[in-house]
Image (tube, helix red, strand yellow):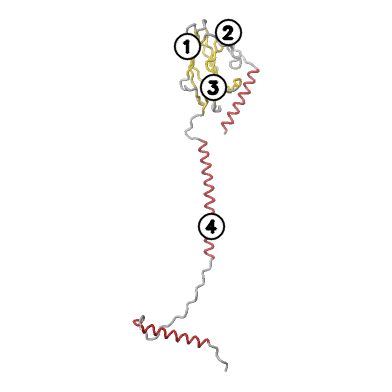
Amino acid sequence: MMRDGLGLTLLLSAIFVGFTAAEEPQTPAGGYRHWLTDLAPPLSGVDSQHWFPDNPGSRFTVGEAVDVVIGLHNSAGEVFNVTHIAGSINAPQAFQYYVQNFTFQPYNSQLKPGEQASLHYTFKPDIYLPVQEWQLSLTAYLRTEKGFFCNTFFNSTVDVVDQPRYIDTQLVFLGVIGLGVLGVIALFSWDSISNLTVVKRVNKRTRKPASRPAPGPKIPEPAGTSEWLKGTNYGQETRSRVKRENSRSKLTSSAPTSPQ
C-alpha cells in the first residue's frame, strides 16, 4: 500500500514537471534547446541499433540498473560528434508526461563518414515506479558543423516489473492475521469450555444425595443355632418361626390398651 501511494505521488509529480517543462523550455550546456521536451531534429544518414544484454525481452526491474549498448554508423557524409545520451520514462498513453528522467550522460565520441562506434549507457527505473507498462525513450545527442541533432534510437513500451521476493510480505501479513483470528476463536472456545466445567462442578457439589430407606430390624439368630446348621431345613424352619414370633410381638405392642 505504501509503495503504491509513493508511486502515485511520483506519477503526479512527473506529470506536473512535464507541464512546467513544456511551458518553460530550458537550455542545457551544449546548445540543445531542451534535452527532453524540445528535441532537435534527427541527423539523416545515421544508422543506429540497440541491445539490452541483461534484459533481452525489454523487461526491466524497479531499482535495478539496466545496461544498453548503442551501435552507431555514420552514413551522413560528414563528421559528427556524439555529445550525450539520455532517456526518460513517459506515460504510455500520453508521451508528454515525463514520469522519470535518466542521466544526461556526456560522451564526446567523434565519428567520421563510414565509421561506426558502440557506446554503453546505464539507467535505473526508480524503486517506487509502479509496476506496469511504460514508454521508454533513449536518445543520442549529436553535433556537426551545421548544428545540433537528436537521434532517438529506442522509443517503445517496456514492462517494468517488481523485484523478486524470497518472502512475500503480503502473504506473511495475511498469515499473521489468520493466526490472530484463530487465536481469538481458540480463546473464546476455551473460555466457554472452562465456564461450562465450573458450572457442572458446582451443580454436582450442591446436589443432595437421594434418601435411602431405613433398614429393617435385624432378625436375631435363635439361641443354640450353630453355624453348621445354617442352610439346612432345620435352620430355615427356625428362622421362619422366629419371624412369626416377632410379627406377633409387634402387633401386640401396637394394639391399643383398653382403659381400666
Q: Which residue is mark 4?
A: 196
Q: Say if 193 sits above or below 208 in the image.
A: above
Work out how far the residue at label 3 is from the one at label 1, CA to CA, in angstroms: 26 Å
Q: What element does badge 4 sit on?
A: helix
Q: Which residue is mark 3?
A: 157
Whichever of callouts 3 and 2 sits on the residue coming sooner in the sequence is: 2
Q: Classify mark 3: residues with Cα within 10 Å, few (<14), some (14-19) or many (20+).
A: some
Work out how far the residue at label 3 is from the one at label 2, CA to CA, in angstroms: 30 Å
Q: Is residue 97 left or right of residue 60?
A: right
Work out how far the residue at label 4 is from the one at label 3, CA to CA, in angstroms: 67 Å
| Residue type indicated by callout 2 | Gly
Image location (x, y in percent) of residue 248: 47, 87
Whichever of callouts 1 and 4 sits on the residue coming sooner in the sequence is: 1
| Residue type indicated by callout 1 | Ala
Image location (x, y in percent) of residue 256: 55, 88
Q: What element does badge 1 sit on?
A: strand
Q: Classify mark 2: residues with Cα within 10 Å, few (<14), some (14-19) or many (20+).
A: few
Quadrant into which the C terminus falls: bottom right
Q: Classify mark 1: residues with Cα within 10 Å, few (<14), some (14-19) or many (20+).
A: some
Whether residue 236 is visible, yes or no, is yes
